[in-house]
């Protein structure tokens, strides 16, 4: 960003130069040395400023990093200043979409300034723009205004806190955080069964074994024999000779019983996001996404937020989560676990965006067997509905999440109102058909229902429909 020889006369220097030339010429013509004495310092000042200028010009550069929106919805960018070898100043003008430009005159020192903006939008976007001009110490020299390219930043979606989440009908794996329906190594009691080869001795339930072994045995003299000490001259006990010579009954352990438990397993979850369209809360802007404001969340912003919230909770308990994007014809992110998988999914969700007109997919994506499929879509066409039907027929548990934002339909023209009513009725019909075939539905932005509570209710419905 360092340029040499970029200095030029500022408007003030041009005024000095013009005034000095006029005064000098006027003094020479009228033979007035006092007028010449007024014009010469102006010319000398311009000459001195030009000869003593810095060999390079100061500059400014934007530095933006990927960052989440957070609770305050603030996005920050750094403005790095690079000074010249002589004291100078910089005039900065920072612009951001949906905000008024901010201007400042700062000393050109080696430092970093911070600019902030508020937005609820996420994804890969061009946010900040910078224009700067260098000014000499006497304001007689300046550079041409330099406009840098906008800073392209990836705004990562934030996640909300969730507690209970639904699980697939069939759990997989040999270990995990959830109790499965098969017997194995776990914590919850399955049943008590006879000891068989392969069972571990530490699983023997000695209380049940002692209670269920009912075959009696007698310890003492054989039948017809007298007391062991008969004739030895010993005195009988206080309880009488009959009690002293009575046999002592006991039990022999002929069968061992073990406690069998339910095995634990992990869940496989596939997040399917429909990024083929992006609509805002104002119906009038559905045909032009450039009219969206920074304080308006689109359907894709809602889908990113919901998907990241679910992914974080599933991965936090040890499940495996994958991602499929219906707007891109590429291989899905395979299910995996861990913090690195959460970072990968968050980055891919932030980069999901419409690419031209929505395209029809000829093939339904093949997802892992037995996985829970969570579909995030606006259901403005039949493609997402048909895929949910196919996955449900294949035996998957499917959860359809409606990501339509809260709409603002007041004040729109009558023709637009009629078109919206037709689209809204078609959407309702599609969601109703999904519920009829066993697909569980959830509206993420429903003002009357909390999605966290709705997911908690779905988590208790584990049986296959």
Image: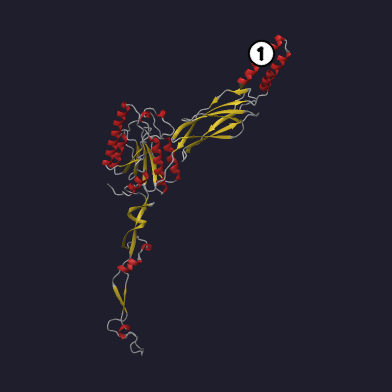
| Label 1 packing within 10 angstroms: few (<14), some (14-19), many (20+) | some
Say which quarter of the image contains residue 5: top right
- Give the residue drawn at x 29%, y 73%: 216
Residue 395 versus residue 187 in the image, above or below: above
Residue nearer the viewer, 402 or 335: 402
User: Residue 176: x percent and y percent?
Assistant: 39, 51
Q: Is residue 231 visible?
A: yes
- Give the residue drawn at x 31%, y 30%: 420
User: Residue 145: x percent and y percent?
Assistant: 56, 24
Q: Is residue 1 visible?
A: no
- Colouring mode (rainbow / by chain / secondary structure / one colour): secondary structure
**Left or right side of 66 for 55:** right
Point out the image quarter for the N terminus. top right
Number of numbered callouts drawn: 1
Disc 1 designates what residue? Answer: 22
Label 1 SS: helix
- Give the residue drawn at x 45%, y 45%: 339
**Left or right side of 343 for 444:** left
């Amino acid at each position: 960003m360092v340029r040499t020889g970029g200095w030029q006369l500022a408007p003030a220097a041009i005024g000095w130069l013009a005034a000095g030339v006029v005064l000098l010429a006027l003094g020479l013509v009228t033979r007035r040395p006092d007028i010449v004495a007024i014009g010469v310092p102006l010319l000398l000042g311009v000459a001195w400023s030009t000869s003593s200028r810095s060999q390079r010009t100061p500059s400014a550069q934007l530095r933006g990093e990927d960052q989440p929106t957070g609770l305050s919805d603030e996005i920050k960018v750094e403005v790095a200043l690079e000074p010249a070898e002589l004291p100078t100043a910089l005039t900065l003008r920072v612009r951001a979409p949906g905000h008024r430009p901010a201007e400042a005159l700062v000393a050109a020192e080696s430092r970093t300034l911070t600019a902030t903006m508020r937005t609820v939008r996420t994804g890969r976007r061009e946010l900040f723009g910078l224009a700067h001009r260098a000014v000499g110490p006497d304001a007689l020299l300046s550079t041409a205004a330099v406009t840098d390219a906008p800073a392209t930043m990836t705004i990562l979606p934030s996640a909300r806190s969730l507690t209970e989440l639904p699980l697939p009908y069939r759990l997989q794996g040999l270990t995990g955080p959830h109790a499965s329906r098969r017997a194995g190594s776990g914590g919850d009691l399955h049943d008590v069964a006879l000891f068989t080869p392969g069972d571990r001795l530490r699983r023997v339930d000695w209380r049940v074994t002692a209670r269920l072994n009912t075959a009696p045995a007698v310890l003492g003299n054989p039948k017809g024999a007298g007391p062991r000490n008969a004739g030895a001259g010993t005195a009988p006990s206080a309880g009488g000779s009959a009690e002293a010579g009575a046999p002592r009954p006991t039990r022999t352990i002929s069968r061992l019983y073990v406690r069998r438990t339910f095995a634990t397993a992990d869940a496989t979850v596939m997040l399917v996001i429909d990024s083929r369209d992006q609509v805002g809360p104002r119906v009038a802007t559905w045909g032009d996404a450039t009219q969206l404001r920074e304080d308006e969340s689109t359907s894709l912003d809602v889908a990113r937020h919901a998907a990241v919230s679910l992914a974080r909770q599933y991965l936090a308990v040890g499940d495996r989560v994958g991602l499929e994007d219906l707007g891109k014809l590429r291989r899905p992110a395979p299910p995996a676990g861990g913090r690195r998988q959460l970072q990968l999914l968050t980055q891919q969700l932030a980069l999901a965006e419409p690419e031209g007109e929505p395209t029809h997919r000829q093939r339904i994506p093949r997802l892992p067997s037995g996985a829970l499929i969570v579909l995030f879509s606006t259901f403005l066409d039949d493609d997402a509905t048909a895929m949910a039907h196919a996955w449900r027929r294949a035996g998957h548990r499917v959860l359809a999440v409606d990501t339509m934002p809260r709409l603002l339909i007041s004040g729109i023209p009558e023709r637009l109102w009629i078109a919206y009513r037709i689209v809204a009725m078609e959407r309702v019909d599609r969601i109703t058909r999904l519920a009829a075939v066993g697909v569980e539905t959830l509206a993420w932005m429903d003002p009357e229902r909390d999605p966290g509570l709705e997911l908690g209710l779905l988590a208790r419905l584990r049986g296959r429909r």
